[in-house]
Amino acid sequence: MHDATLPRTWRGDAGTVGLVSLAHGTSHFFHLLLPPLFPWIMHDLGLRFTDVAFLTTVFFAVSGTGQALAGFAVDRVGALRMLLGAIALLATSGVALGFAHSYAGLVVSAALAGAGNSIFHPADFTILNRRVSAGRLGHAFAMHGLVGNLGWAAGASFMAGVGAAAGWHAAGFAAAAAAALVGVFLWTQRGHLAVSPAHSSHGGGAHAPATAASPSSRFGFLQSATVWTCFAFFYFSTGAAGILQNFAPTILAHLYPITIALGSAALTAYLLGSAAGMLAGGFLASHVARSDRIIAVALLLAAVVPAQLAMKALAVAALLPAMAILGFGTGVAGPSRDLLVRHAAASRFGADAFGRVYGFVYSGLDIGVATIPLAIGRLLDGGHFSWAMGSVAVLLVVATGAAVRVR
């Protein structure tokens, strides 16, 4: 098996990064399996907004819980097997949506998609950390995040387009077919993805102590304050992103004399800025040793934007550039945050623990998206739109403190 300690060609690393990024983009595609279809689903099944919102909660609740557990399976049976199993679960969720004729069927589809999504982060980062040369990991993490964002864009347009043209059942089957094609392609290229399971590993440049892989200490990482601080970082930083992704158009339309359409354009500017920031962040992460400093500077500068928006201190003409800057700052922090977790995992528990540490830490991402926007929804129901936007700034500052604490 290849290992990040062995000499690796640029082409070999690029092949691995491209395939893992494709898998990550597919997982993000299925984040939007259901939401773009909500108008048609609500009409056909007579559902309320609270009913369809619960489907999103099911997805992220299952994903967050499953992600913490999937890391152990990745370490035990191997990242490639788990990754292919994740793709199969996503395809099955699309089939379940295609056959769904009741609300219960939609819940099953959401749960299957969440279960599949739970596997990607521990599997992806195990493969990247153990196959890609250490000097290229910053760029690898940047590409991984960038293609994930592109998966969101593709999922939104694909599901809405097929739903409008052929109905939401057909959209489910089409999504299943897309996942199946990705799965077959990954299988044909599996030589670029294979790493040995942890119990037979020779390590990835950071050998775990003898006790780190023993059954009695597999949960030892949960006693680490560093791991819990990483979890908190993901919880708060992703919670801030969740607020923007769910409510930015509505919040901006209440704070400024603009339409929802312009608010949606501001959200698009944020997402595009985030993608650009990830590319820049990959370069920085590869050339700056202190990941925490990159994260701190990027997130603190980004936090200035929602603070100003909350105080209505910006002109309407500045909204789109400001949201792009906010996205750029959070995007720059992305590759460095992944390196920060790598350093925390490898230095304390060894490469054999990548799966379970990444799985647990990244479950904070799903839990943040599942819980924080729900709490902000209550603020919005009460008409506190400035408080809601100000919460984004507060969460970014708290996440910054967690990143510095990890270091």
Image (spheres, helix red, strand yellow):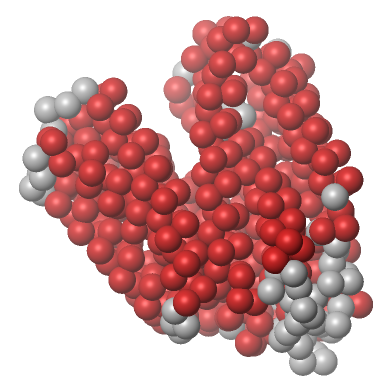
Left of 37 or right of it: where is 277?
left
Residue drawn at x 27%, y 66% is: 300
| Picture coordinates of residue 388, whole percent (x, y) | 25, 46
Left of 365 or right of it: where is 82?
right
| Picture coordinates of residue 3, whole percent (x, y) | 80, 75
In this picture, is 389 found above or below 50? below
- Asked if residue 229 can be seen in this view, the reply is no
Left of 102 or right of it: where is 228?
left
Choose top left, top right, bottom left or bottom right for residue 263.
top left
Choose top left, top right, bottom left or bottom right for residue 236.
bottom left
Residue drawn at x 21%, y 23% is: 259
Choose top left, top right, bottom left or bottom right for residue 49.
top left
Question: Is residue 404 or residue 143 the one in the foreground?
Answer: 143
Question: Is residue 160 or residue 44 the one in the foreground?
Answer: 160
Left of 164 or right of it: where is 297?
left
In this picture, is 184 found above or below 161? below
| Picture coordinates of residue 35, whole percent (x, y) | 53, 27
Residue drawn at x 17%, y 46% is: 309
| Picture coordinates of residue 403, whole percent (x, y) | 42, 74
- Asked if residue 307 can be seen in this view, the reply is yes
Question: Is residue 183 or residue 348 the one in the foreground?
Answer: 183
Q: Residue furthest right?
A: 200
Residue drawn at x 55%, y 73% is: 339
Screen quadrant of the N terminus: bottom right
In this picture, is 208 found above or below 265? below
Number of callouts: 0
